[in-house]
Image (tube, helix red, strand yellow):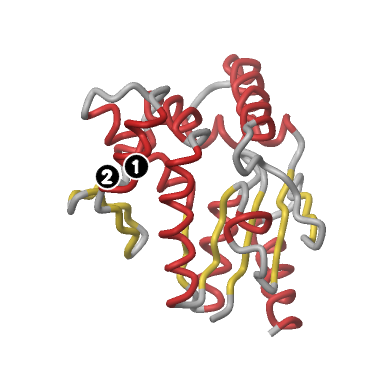
C-alpha cells in the first residue's frame, strides 16, 4: 500500500489539498482531525469533561468510528456537520492531548493505511502515525493567510480577523507543545508554503512527488 502523509498547522490547507490529492490519485482520503473531533463530539454528548484523560481514552477505545464517502460516522450516525461546531473545535484540541485517545485513534489510522492506499492528513502523520510513508509533506502558510482562510470558511468578516489570528496562534502553541505526538515537521518531509498559491498548484506538486517516488 502507498501512503501520502500530509502534516501542518491549522489553516495551512491540509484538508482541501489532501482531499484533492486523494481524488487525483484514486487514493482514500483520511482526515485524522475529523476523528479527534468525532471523539470530542461524543464526549460532549455524554457529558464527559474533555480534560478527563481516562474517560476520553475509554470512549475513544469503545466508540464505533468510521470514515466513508467523505463523511464521518459515530456509532452509525452521520456527524460530518456536527463535528465542525465551535464547541467541538475547542474540545477537540484538549481531547487530542490525551495519550490514550491518541493511541486508540493511531491504531485505527494505521489499520486504514495497511488496507488501502491513503492520503492521510493531520499534525503527526509523518512523524508518528506513518513514519515510513514514502511521501511526506509539511504544508505551511503565513498566520495572516491562515486567518483569512478561516474567515472565509466560517463566514467571518474582516473585523473578526484579529480574533481568528489569536485563536490560530493559540492552537499552534497547543499542538506544538503537547507532550504526546506534537505538531512537528518530519526530517524527510517536503515543505510546501501555500501562501498565495492555488490549490491546484499545490496538488500538482504533491501528485508529482508521489509519481516520482512510486
Q: Classify residue 129 by image quadrant.
A: bottom right
Where residue 175 appears, x then y in whole percent? 63, 34
Residues at marks 1 and 2, CA–CA distance in whole angstroms: 7 Å
Relative to 119, is 195 above or below? above
Q: Please tell me which residue is depicted at 62% across the width and 32% down the height of the picture.
A: 178
Q: Classify residue 85 by image quadrant.
A: top left
Where residue 95 appears, x then y in whole percent? 44, 32
Counting residues from the start of the chain, the first of labels 1 and 2 encountered is 1
Mark 1 surroundings: few (<14), some (14-19) or many (≥20) residues within 10 A: many
For residue 38, the mark is: 1
Where residue 120 appears, x then y in whole percent? 54, 61
Mark 2 surroundings: few (<14), some (14-19) or many (≥20) residues within 10 A: some
Looking at the figure, which quarter contains the N terminus?
Answer: bottom right
In the rendered image, the residue lying farthest to the left is: 76
Relative to 151, is 103 above or below? below
Q: Please tell me which residue is depicted at 33% across the width and 65% down the height of the picture.
A: 69
Relative to 14, is 143 above or below? above
Q: Are marks 1 and 2 in contact (CB under 8 Å)?
A: yes
The number of numbered discs placed on residues in the rendered structure image is: 2
- Judged by depth in the image, the label closer to the viewer, 1 or 2, is 1
Q: Please tell me which residue is depicted at 25% across the width and 53% down the height of the picture.
A: 64
- What element does badge 2 sit on? loop
**Closest to the observer: 138 or 133?**
133
Relative to 91, is 189 above or below? below
**Closest to the observer: 174 or 152?**
174
For residue 79, the mark is: 2
Looking at the figure, which quarter contains the C terminus?
Answer: bottom right
Amino acid at each position: 500500500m502507498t501512503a501520502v502523509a500530509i502534516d501542518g498547522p491549522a489553516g495551512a490547507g491540509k484538508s482541501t489539498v489532501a482531499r484533492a490529492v486523494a481524488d487525483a490519485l484514486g487514493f482514500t482520503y483520511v482526515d485524522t482531525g475529523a476523528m479527534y473531533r468525532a471523539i470530542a463530539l461524543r464526549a460532549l454528548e455524554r457529558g464527559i469533561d474533555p480534560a478527563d484523560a481516562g474517560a476520553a481514552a475509554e470512549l475513544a477505545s469503545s466508540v464505533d468510528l468510521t470514515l466513508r464517502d467523505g463523511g464521518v460516522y459515530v456509532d452509525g450516525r452521520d456527524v460530518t456537520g456536527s463535528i465542525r461546531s465551535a464547541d467541538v473545535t475547542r474540545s477537540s484540541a484538549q481531547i487530542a492531548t490525551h495519550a490514550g485517545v491518541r493511541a486508540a485513534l493511531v491504531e485505527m489510522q494505521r489499520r486504514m493505511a495497511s488496507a488501502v492506499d491513503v492520503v492521510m492528513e493531520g499534525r503527526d502523520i509523518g512523524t508518528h502515525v506513518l513514519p515510513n510513508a514514502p511521501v511526506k509533506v509539511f504544508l505551511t502558510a503565513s498566520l495572516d493567510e491562515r486567518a483569512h482562510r478561516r474567515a472565509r470558511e466560517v463566514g467571518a468578516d474582516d473585523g473578526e480577523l484579529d480574533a481568528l489570528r489569536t485563536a490560530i496562534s493559540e492552537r499552534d502553541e497547543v499542538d506544538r507543545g503537547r507532550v504526546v505526538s506534537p505538531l512537528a515537521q518530519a526530517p524527510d518531509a517536503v515543505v510546501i508554503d501555500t501562501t498565495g498559491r492555488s490549490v491546484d498548484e499545490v496538488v500538482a506538486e504533491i501528485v508529482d512527488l508521489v509519481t516520482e517516488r512510486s
